[in-house]
Amino acid sequence: MNFKLLTVTLLISGMLIPDLSKAQNSDQPDSIDVFITQKMQQQHIPALQLAIVRHGKLIKQKTYGTANLENSIAATDQSIFSINSITKAFSGVAVMQLAEEGKLKITDPISLYIDSLPVSWQGITLQQVLTNTSGLPDILDENEQVLENANESRAWEKVKTLPLEFNAGDRFSYNQTGYVIIGKIITKLSGVHFTKFIEDRQFKVAGMQLTRFGDSYDVVQNSAGAYTMNKFINGRMVRGKSPGTAYIQFPVFFRTAAGILSTSKDMAQWIIALQSGKLLKDKTSIDALWTAAVLNNGKIGGFNQLTNGYALGWPTVTRADHPAVGPVGGGRSALFVYLKDDLSIVVLTNLLGANPERFIDEIGAYYIPDMHEANGFGLSPVIQKLRTALMKQGFDKSVAVMAGLKKKDPAFSPGEDELNGWGYKLLSQKEIAKALAILKLNSILYPESANTHDSLGEILEITGDYKAALLSYKKSLALNPKNTNASNRIKALSGS
């Protein structure tokens, strides 16, 4: 997922993950605790906070792991985590609060509130800015640093000289400039700085006692800090084997985009306050807040197949079964509100790249069983259809089953990436034989793809069929001579 982080420095330390077998609460672990502990161990997540809201009440809140690896300080319910870009959801609520007061309309052009804008910007609406469909140039450079060394006035003047990336509404493109504009508008219309407006109108109203704005340069009591598995080696980003310390800066003028620090309990209270009418009085305001933008071509656009749309600061999980709005932040924290299930789940971590949005549905499945990955939830309709047929006839007959489905419906065609993703999902579920069958089918359906043969090589190597794995890697390398994974595995297997 291409989330832009404002990373100033990454310092890698050789800290090891401690034993996560005990949560910080004294009660006996349940199935969710066991699942989360396993996820933390698999992904090297130092600390995680969970909160679950059902029927308007906080029904589970728990903290796991270590907040500070350097000093072996356990995480507690008081530990404070950065929520990164989930901050944008607070900005969306703030804009809708001003809309309810009659101070703006989301369909208004930004030029109605901001002077001296480039002519090409003046027709862009607040809605297009909030939904990342504005086409504005980004105030972050190619290294994901704020322009002009984060000097507010110089960065603002610089970004105004850059051309639009596309016509407003043509596509989705994650963009921080729009949220700097939103901060200026909130400050102008509310009469106070936008951080104070959000503190007064959201933190205080929702009873978020530990929530505040800040970043790595602020001394925050009980901070859970930030860690990363990645570091630069010879100019290349490389994933390490253990977490290292990450330092992230969010300048004050940037804090409509990112910069809130919170706890899972506070976040749960915020959701309860929002859904109970304490933050927004009119249900139509929440409907607008959570409705994905429709592009000029009639489609919606988002980060990926999961968070596939974007509303007013809120990514959306638009799907037929169990749709949700799902703000995500820094690849480390996520919040899903299941729109038809009266269920919300908050997961905060201190590991950049933990991507909890990828396993929140599985947590939800403990309350809604058909959401379990093992039941096929999250797969596309075409993969669901293939799965149903394979469950009846056997995964070992995948080629024949695929041919039968294709004969009945010539348009039936599962995508290469879909099959590859499903294969690895089966592998993560320890369904090795099924994973092998799917990845083998993918290489047959897409024989000219270097990736399908590379993936098949990996699963064959896992099963111990080194001879077949070597052949697959060689096919992959022939199709893509730049495939370093294939070349490295060929050397390793040839040597053995």
Image (cartoon, helix red, strand yellow):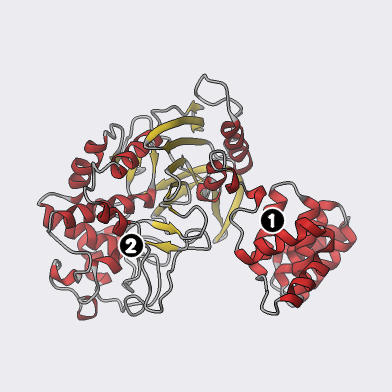
Q: Which residue is depicted at the point 43% across and 68% down?
A: 301
Q: Secondary structure at mark 2?
A: loop
Asked if the residue at tag 1 contacts the one at tag 2, i.e. Cβ–Cβ closer than 8 Å, the answer is: no
Which is nearer the eye, 79 or 378?
Answer: 378
Please tell me which residue lies in front, 64 or 305: 305
Query: In this figure, which residue is indicated by the disc labeled 1?
Result: 424
Say above or below: 322 vs 57. Answer: below
Q: Which element type, helix, strand or loop, lies under badge 1? A: helix
Task: Compare residues 108 and 140 and report the one nearer the observer.
Answer: 108
From the viewer's perspective, tell me whether residue 88 is left or right of residue 407.
left
Rendered position, 484 above or below 345: below
- The amino acid beneath tag 1 is Tyr
Label tally: 2
Q: Can residue 476 be seen at all in this image of the molecule? A: no
Kindly indicate the quadrant of the structure image that contains residue 298: bottom left
Whether residue 317 appears in this view of the structure is yes
Q: Specify few, some or many for label 2: CA neighbours under 10 Å numbering under 14, 14-19, or 20 or more.
A: many
Instruction: Describe residue 314's horizontal placement relative to residue 228 as left or right.
Output: left
Q: Amino acid at mark 2?
A: Gln
Quadrant of the image occupied by residue 172: bottom left
Q: Is residue 189 above or below residue 165?
A: above
Q: Which residue is mark 2?
A: 176
Residue 113: image location, x then y, percent: 14, 66
- The spot of residue 331 in percent (x, y) is 48, 51
